Amino acid sequence: MKKKNLEVLAVLSDLKADVAGVLQQLEVQAIQQVQMSEQIVELIRMISDQQGYLNNQIQSNSVSLKSLEAISSFGSQEIFQYVQLIEAARNSAQYSSVFSAADPMISIIIPTHTNPLALWERTIPSIVAQSHTNLEILVVVDGNHPDIFETTLNDSIQCGDHRISVHLAPPTPTEFPELESWSPDQKKRFDWFRSGNGPFNHGMNIATGHWIAPFSHDDAMHPTGYERVLKKAMQMRWEYCYAPIVRLSPTDSSIIHSFPPRSHHFGVQGSLIHSALKMFRYDFRDALVGLPNDYGMIRRMMLCGIRMGTIEEAASDYYPSSLWP
């Protein structure tokens, strides 16, 4: 009897060991299933992220293709026309008279879409104090902001300088089909790159000077800036002449300049454009491919073979709007 009991105990012990082994295997399998579930969840997340990235890339490429289509159409169809217009202008008596004028008039175009203190406390005082005095100062209000036109006009009257006139540009489009799939940041950058297009182009229409001088409503010219740029342009018979720009922050300063002009290493403040080149304008299509409006215009000038050069000494101060009121 004892022998049988011992055998039963031995069998039970073996069964207990087997059960323990099975339980251990089940526990390991359960852990593995949890790990596999976590891996599956992570894989699903990764697939979702990749799908989102691919969707963004598809949208971005779609936008880029539309943008490239716009800019290629712009370049191929219009550059040749510009070249023909330039050659006709160079053969005219009016073209030569710009270089022979005893006291050339400079038409300074200052687009504005707000009415900051900087316009009347920094920009205008630096313009009216120029050593070259034969100036036509055109303050052109963005037509999409007509509410500030009267205030700007009153400010100009209080300034009391007869060379200053205030104009309201026609409204320009604010909605662009090309931007449908763009992110808010992309749209903001686009708006920044095309800001001032309408007012500047309107200023080109009404300017009567021998030379056209694009400027901004919150920067400042050095006292002899235009005199020095003008002298060099006339001496060298350049059709476009520009100068280094001093970039000012509240804590330091640096020089912005390159020759030939390069995007983000160049600015039109303090530059002069021969009046025969009025066919060159700011165009929103430049912003579609990431070009600031001023560089986009100068880039087209370079493609057309405009005779240009630069002086060595800075002629203006640039106050980044993000750093200054």
Image (cartoon, rainbow, N blue to C red):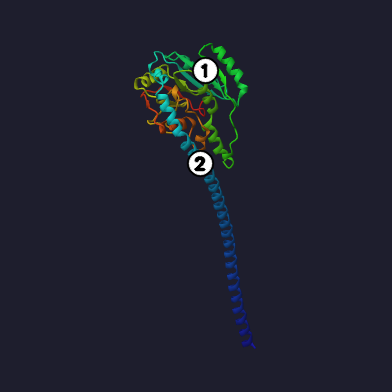
CB of mark 2 within 8 Å of CB of mark 1? no
Corner quadrant of residue 20? bottom right
Task: Check the image and report above or below for 25 versus 44.
Answer: below
Q: Which mark is residue 235?
A: none
Task: Report crowding for label 1: few under 14, some 14 to 19, many 20 or more residues within 10 A (C-alpha).
Answer: few
Mark 1 lies on residue: 121
Q: Secondary structure at mark 1?
A: helix
Q: Is residue 18 left or right of residue 129?
A: right
Mark 2 lies on residue: 69
Whether residue 95 is visible, yes or no, is yes
Task: Check the image and report above or below for 158 versus 177.
Answer: above
As shown in the figure, which amino acid type bears the numbered disc 2? Glu
Q: Residue 171 at x, y = what percent?
A: 60, 27
Looking at the picture, tell me which residue is in the foreground, 297 or 183. Answer: 297
Looking at the picture, tell me which residue is in the foreground, 289 or 112. Answer: 289
Looking at the picture, tell me which residue is in the foreground, 323 or 263. Answer: 263
Q: Is residue 3 left or right of residue 79?
A: right
Q: Residue 66 at x, y = what percent?
A: 53, 42
Q: Is residue 247 left or right of residue 39?
A: left
As shown in the figure, which amino acid type bears the numbered disc 1? Glu
